[in-house]
Image (spheres, rainbow, N blue to C red):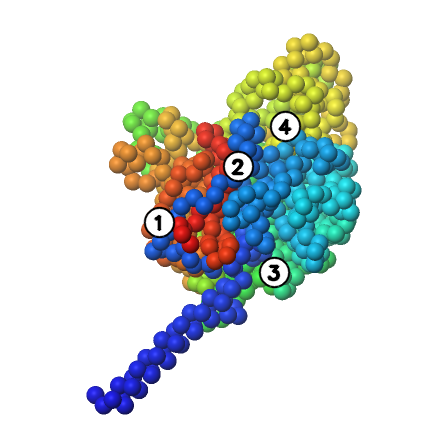
Amino acid sequence: MHNSVKFANIIRRGKLLLLICFTTFYSACGPGGAKKYTDWKVTGGSRENVRYSSLNQIDTSNVDQLNVAWVYYSEKQDSSRYGSMQCNPIVVDNTLFGVSPKLKLFALDAATGVEKWSFNPADTIANKTWHRSSVNMNRGVAYWADGDDKRIIYTVGSVALCVNAQTGKLVTSFGKDGGIDLRNGLDRDSSKVFVAPTSPVMIYKDLFFLSGLVGEETPGHIRAFDVRTGKQKWIFHTIPYPGEPGYETWEDSTAYKYMGSTNSWSGFSLDEKRGILYAPTGNPTNDFYGGQRRGAGLYGNCILALDAATGKLIWHFQTVHHDVWDMDLSSPPVLVTIKKDGKAIDAVVQSTKTGLIFILNRETGEPIYPIEERAVDTTTALAREQLWPTQPFPTLPKPFARHTLTEADLNRLVDDSSYQDILTRFRSYRAGSIFTPPSKEGTVVFPGYDGGGEWGGPSVDPETNVLYVNANEMAWVLNIIDNNAPKEEKRTKLEAGAAFYNQYCMGCHGPERMGGGDYPSIIGVENKYNYTRFLELLSTGRRMMPGFNNLDSLEKDAIASFILNIKQQQNQEYKGRNEKRDAPPRALYGFTGYHKFLTKEGYPAISPPWGTISAINLNSGEYLWKIPFGEFEELSKKGIPETGRENYGGPVTTAGGILFIGASADGYMRAYNKRTGALLWKVKLPAPGVATPAIYSINGKQYVVIACGGSKWGGQSSDAYVAFALPGK
């Protein structure tokens, strides 16, 4: 070949190589690329909640070399202070901000894990006005700055606190002495409501937004507050008032006065450019009986698009009509730009407990893929119940969790006597498919109260538009019971307390007070709480337990005499009214508690997989791969293929080709190849990482950190935050 031709070929190859390098760089760092995903200043990595990092120092070739970089014990390894810890920390200016099991806010050197400061909300000196020792769970905090004014906003029970991000001291100009009482401003009697946000607030300009965990008679209205002053700026009624859109979807015209829940407890996503706040909501009170809230019930089980500046509704989409299965929208939607039919479409992607994924136009709420209203079973023997005849099902993507359950789907990994036991029980229940109506004989709820996609939410790689979602497939048994009216004659405190327990507490702790599912037994609770502390608990709530401020002092006293077994009080006359005149209508039905459908050995009574991870191309709606996630090690040792296991907390994907996830009950942190689903690395954590990891870089070194609280299933618990990094980097 002539030298000039060779030279020309070399030039062409060089130009091609340069073009490839430039294209790769532009894709990662240029406009429209992933440059904005290099930090972790917001829970979920971004206000779009994509849970993605464009950092790539850790990749598929070296992830198996990860070592522990540092460990921070947020409660100084005091096991008496352990508890639920589900926080996804944030990192700003090389400082990591997180929350301990007892809601202590802390700031760490993100490279070393060395504490810079901590703020204890129970400290009566540091927090003289809002101090409290009874705590609810927290999943993250929010950061705001204007010049040298740098703040952390986070919630402790019914209080939103504003803390100086540099000093750890309360910003006393915010609200009153650094806090605001969230019971005020809900357009209800503040002395009777309970609200305790567990997810982080979302910040837009000088506003922050919240809703949160609420009591059964507290509405989950969405509100905006001024970051500087704490003043409430607007409210969106999730249970509409007369004259507001959606009011007509409630048959009971007075529902707005007393109905509760319909709350955005899982947090928000934000389109900053458009100024749109996206809020997913849960179902209205009561969870499993809708005969006293007939109608579609807006804005329960909705994706809401609100004008962030004003709170005005832009659009809504309801994912479950007249929900009686507790199918709350359990995570904020993901905001992505998908490519369909040659067009770029800004979309909202919502995963659900039902294992469905709704993909909607971000501006209009119109479906990107067709959504069909399909007929479902409406047969019910419950008085006044009127189930909705259809439910929405996206045609694409297909469900990432099973929807049907037959005898062929029962667990055959156990011996025959155990199998026969679950078969006998299964044949006594109502079962078959998703949306099977609740019943007194027992209804199998599947994929389950915590099934499908949970509060951890999915991760989306914005470069490929592949969504990664972990899921639970756990069947539960729902037993409806009559909620009999109280006797008209005089009652003792014991009789009244037992009746109130059945009405307000049995759903979580069971008819025998032995607990069930994720709710603990309260037998012997008198050894832990005295009368005064127990009354405080009833008011403040704790972790998953809401406060019961709707109860008056006589009702709380009666419950205390029953649960704490105070013999000297139990025979005394209960002097409260049998039925309150100003109270909402008494629920006609209750339920016996949260009961997993399990084998005698404690395994799920259905066939595996019991936990999964799926990779779905949002541009086409097609699956790339699906794998079991998590294991029972004793089954693995018997040669049984990985079964999957219950998991809570979400995944994070990276430009290095990795999917990181803790979440599983087996207590491992794992790294998968995001393209194939192949397991590349796993390590045992101090306790299960029931949280979502955070990924960040300090001085050119990439870190992956996760909160390891455990305690969701009993067993190992901890107060540790553990960070991993490559050696010598």
Q: Which residue is mark 4?
A: 504
Of the numbered discs 2 and 3, the one sitting upstream in the chain is 2
Task: Tell me the kind of residue under disc 3.
Answer: Asp
Of the numbered discs 2 and 1, the one sitting upstream in the chain is 1
Q: CA distance from mark 4 to mark 1?
A: 49 Å
Q: What is the total number of numbered labels drawn onto the structure image?
A: 4
Q: Quadrant of residue 283?
A: top right
Which mark's residue is nearer the viewer, 2 or 3? 2
Q: CA distance from mark 2 to mark 4?
A: 36 Å
Of the numbered discs 4 and 1, the one sitting upstream in the chain is 1
Of the numbered discs 1 and 3, the one sitting upstream in the chain is 1
Task: Tell me the kind of residue under disc 4.
Answer: Tyr
**Closer to the camera in the image, 687 or 439:** 687
**Closer to the camera in the image, 544 or 388:** 544
Q: Position of residue 346 (x, y in %)?
A: 54, 64
Residue 489 appears in view:
no
Q: Position of residue 57 (x, y in %)?
A: 42, 57
Q: CA distance from mark 4 to mark 3?
A: 39 Å
Task: Tell me the kind of residue under disc 2.
Answer: Tyr
Q: Which residue is mark 2?
A: 73
Q: Which residue is mark 1?
A: 64
- Asked if residue 362 lies left or right of residue 493, the reply is left
Q: CA distance from mark 2 to mark 1?
A: 25 Å
